[in-house]
Amino acid sequence: MKQLLLLSLISLQFHFVVRASDQPVLVTPQWVKEHLNDPALVILQANYLQLDYDKEHIAGARFLWPGWLAIDSPEGNFNVPDKKQATAVLQRLGISKNSKIVLCHVRNEVSVTSRMFLTLEQLGLRGQVSFLSGGLEAWKKAGYEVTKEVPTVKKGNFKANPGDLIVDKDYVLHALRNDSFAVVDARMKRFYDGDPTGNPRDGHITGALNIPFTEMVDSTNAFKPVGQLQEYFTPVAPEASKEIVLYCFIGQTASVVYIAGRLLGYRMKLYDASLQEWSRRDELPMEKTKNSGGKL
């Protein structure tokens, strides 16, 4: 029993070890500027439309269309691609085993770019991905130049090796019964409470707590300081040893809370199917906040 306890403690400590080689979760424009000449640096500008990338981007940045790494299917939206598909996309973007990746968003497209961060970590690049806080607007505000020039990209050699960051409904049910987990709804509070959403059922997963993704960033679409972020996490996970299982509508906006949790050192998972699936399965429990109005 003592040996088992010791092994458990070692395993727990391992989750929170930050390797010296790991990149910071968030980086500033200054950090990116200082590393621009690093041959291992890969800047990915995530845009819904290539038009935005064609208009302006950081020199050397490559265009990342979210649809390449967040696949829609008859089973749901925003699915992680299989190993073969993911490997082809990442190699085409010039990503190799030693790449240092920085994700850059445009305007308020924080959530979809955050989903790209989570997806890259799921595909085996944890510790090699950073998020440019404030995105392209912060870069320009710092006085740095942008370009329309499209870089020539040499094919990378990275091979996707999916991890366990993405979980299913059974994992969520297990987490709800276990005190070492916290299940967190990342949607705005009014939807958590029960405002209509268009899903078959409104409200939240019974027993889930709420950390709204909109509260993770400020008016400039940059992540808030860690002290402010911690104020949202402490009520739902007072002990850093708790694993947080996130969900939202389709697995996109919860990715913003994922980055905040990673920044704070929490173990984070995503229920990717989220309420798109859960609300359609009548056997899965949902509830509304008291006095929110409406029926379950």
Image (cartoon, rainbow, N blue to C red):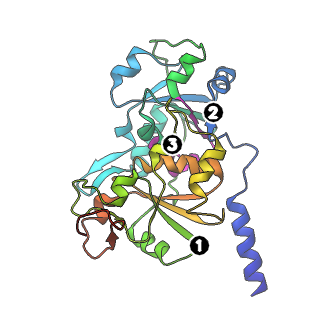
Q: Secondary structure at mark 3?
A: helix
The residue range painted magenta reads 115-134
Looking at the image, residue 7 sits to the left or right of residue 166; the answer is: right
For disc 2, the marked residue is 27
Q: What's under tag 3, amino acid-wise? A: Phe
- Eyeballing the image, is 292 above or below 42? below
For the C terminus, the image quarter is bottom left
Q: Nearer the viewer, residue 238 or 162?
A: 238
Looking at the image, residue 67 sits to the left or right of residue 174; the answer is: left
Tell me the distance, in whole angstroms, between the alpha carbons under discs 2 and 3: 13 Å
Residue 111: percent from left, percent from top: 43, 41
- Residue at 40% across, 21% down: 53
Q: What's under tag 2, amino acid-wise? A: Val
For disc 1, the marked residue is 180
- Residue at 54% across, 33% down: 222
Mark closer to the chain start, 3 or 1? 3
For disc 3, the marked residue is 117
Looking at the image, residue 206 sits to the left or right of residue 15; the answer is: left
**Given this view, does label 3 or label 1 mark the residue nearer the observer?**
1
Q: Nearer the viewer, residue 192 or 117?
A: 192
